[in-house]
Amino acid sequence: MSIIKNPLLYVGLKGEKHIYSLFGSGANLSCIHPDSLKGLADAMPMSKSRMVSTASVGHYIEIKEWVLLEFYLNDVLLSDEFLVVPGLSEEAIIGVATMQKWRIKLDFEHDTVFVDPKVAKMQLI
């Protein structure tokens, strides 16, 4: 597993701020630390909590909240839902599902993140 960590501008209903976001090839879903939401957005309760596995074998975390956020990547506005994870080791994690949705490519050799230019055009339709 490789990782890239970049500051991204997030936009929520309460405001906007830069959050260091980890792009990890091992994380399936996008997650955010509850403290990162301060001044940005309010978390919403999930209709049913989820038990999510962690990197530690046999260790699970119960997720009870989520939030919809927009974020800028290379000046392209994207959005997705983020699970609010208490005790998350990062401020935010962009998961594989979000990367696939928005055609985000990772270049681990150069520690860079790319978004397909066609994505910006898709948003205008």
Image (spheres, helix red, strand yellow):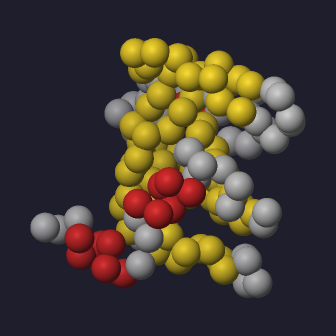
Q: Nearer the viewer, residue 9 or 55?
A: 55
- Is residue 83 among the parts visible in the rendering? yes
Count numbered badges in the picture: 0
Q: Nearer the viewer, residue 6 or 94?
A: 94
Classify residue 89 by image quadrant: top right
Classify residue 117 by image quadrant: bottom left
Q: Residue at x 46, y 15 (%)?
A: 48
**20 versus 36 height, above or below:** below
Q: Which residue appears farthest toward the front when viewing the image?
A: 58
**5 versus 57 height, above or below:** below
Q: Residue at x 56, y 45 (%)?
A: 29
Specify the quadrant that holds the C terminus.
Answer: bottom left
- Is residue 15 among the parts visible in the rendering? no
Name the side, left or right, on which 6 lies relative to 13.
right
Where is residue 114 shown, x and y percent of the image? 53, 77
Q: Residue at x 74, y 43 (%)?
A: 90
Where is residue 112 shown, x and y percent of the image? 65, 77
Where is residue 80 shown, x and y percent of the image? 41, 47
Q: Which residue appears farthest toward the right when viewing the image?
A: 56
Q: Nearer the viewer, residue 69 or 31?
A: 31
**20 versus 124 height, above or below:** above
Q: Residue at x 60, y 37 (%)?
A: 32
Specify the quadrant that holds the N terminus.
Answer: bottom right
Name the side, left or right, on which 25 lies relative to 66.
right
